[in-house]
Amino acid sequence: MDYTTLSRISLKNLTVMHVLLMTHSVTQTAEILCVTQSSVSKALGQLKSDLNDELFFRRGNQLMPTQYALSIGPAIHNVLSNISGIFEQGEFAPERFGGSLSLAMRESTFELFAPTLCDISQKLGASAQLSISTKEQFSFEALLSGKLDFLVLPHDVSQPPTLSKSLVWQTILEDEMVCLMNPNHPLADVELDIDGYLSCRHINVIDKDLSEPYFEQTLTQHHGARQIAMRVADFGSAASTCHHSNYLFTCSKRWAETALQAKGLVAKPLPFDYGQVAYSLVWNTVSLNNPACRWLHSQLLAKS
């Protein structure tokens, strides 16, 4: 370890870099850190010299990170989280917390966790913020870089969702899958068998981060592939489509029992063995150095 080089590195400059990677704005970074814009620009200039890279380039009103800046983002997040853990000791008092906490999830997942999230928000201080984004906005990369504290995700238990060793997965809710259909569907009043399931056209929900679901692989290998008629962004869109068509939608039973969009649809068990499904909480290991994140983590796991 080169202690001479390390002694020249400013923690303030790394903090500026971390916030710039989230905001892409000198003005917003200065506001968050309660410093002047010139102070942010000076810190960025020093980092450019130290790291021998431009780090950001301007595109319109935003600062866009270089590939190198993106690549070191997770490492900077880890360093700052570890240092934060040294200084932030003692019991966390949510009512005195004035910072921000962030999660991302599908819109459909929010329907299941809305009571828990509202309860968590009301336990926090008056100036605290609980930011909940869609998974499409922030996903695994955001956990690694520190833009996001937690992700809540429905998935096949047997499916390895990510290869990153820095991310931890823990089941919050176990679930099963059902097939939704319009009450006027020809199969609504009969037992759903595999021939009927495969004879119909289906709606599929797009997910760019997860590989092909285990249930899809099993179905194709043992019985044949589904006929996908439509691909939509979320469960709600798929359920709405069911109301207006004879397409089938395979989804979470817990969601189907909770969501307003699914009310009035007929739910039937899947006619084949599809494995286990669940909702899991995902986080970066270093995030739990932060007492506020540890508290939020415990509140979310209490759902299980």
Image (cartoon, grey):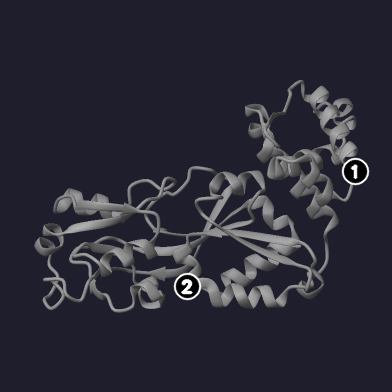
For marks 2 and 1, give the one nearer the viewer: 1
Position of the N terminus by quadrant: top right
Residue 251 visible to an observer of this rendering: no
> Which circle marks residue 36 in the picture?
1
Mark pair 2, 1: CA separation: 42 Å
Q: Amino acid at mark 1?
A: Thr
Q: Residue furthest top?
A: 52
Toward which corner of the image does residue 199 lie, by quadrant?
Answer: bottom left
212 to 47, vertically: above or below: below
**Residue 221, image x and y in percent?**
18, 48
Residue 46 visible to an observer of this rendering: yes
* Left or right: 41 in relation to 116: right
Count the marks.
Answer: 2
Toward which corner of the image does residue 201 lie, by quadrant?
Answer: bottom left
Q: Residue at x 21, y 64 (%)?
A: 245
In the rendered image, which residue does mark 2 sit on? 112
Secondary structure, mark 1, is loop
* Left or right: 298 in relation to 225: right
Q: Nearer the viewer, residue 213 or 257?
A: 257
Label 1 packing within 10 angstroms: few (<14), some (14-19), many (20+)? some
**Residue 107, image x and y in percent?**
48, 63
Toward which corner of the image does residue 257 lie, by quadrant?
Answer: bottom left
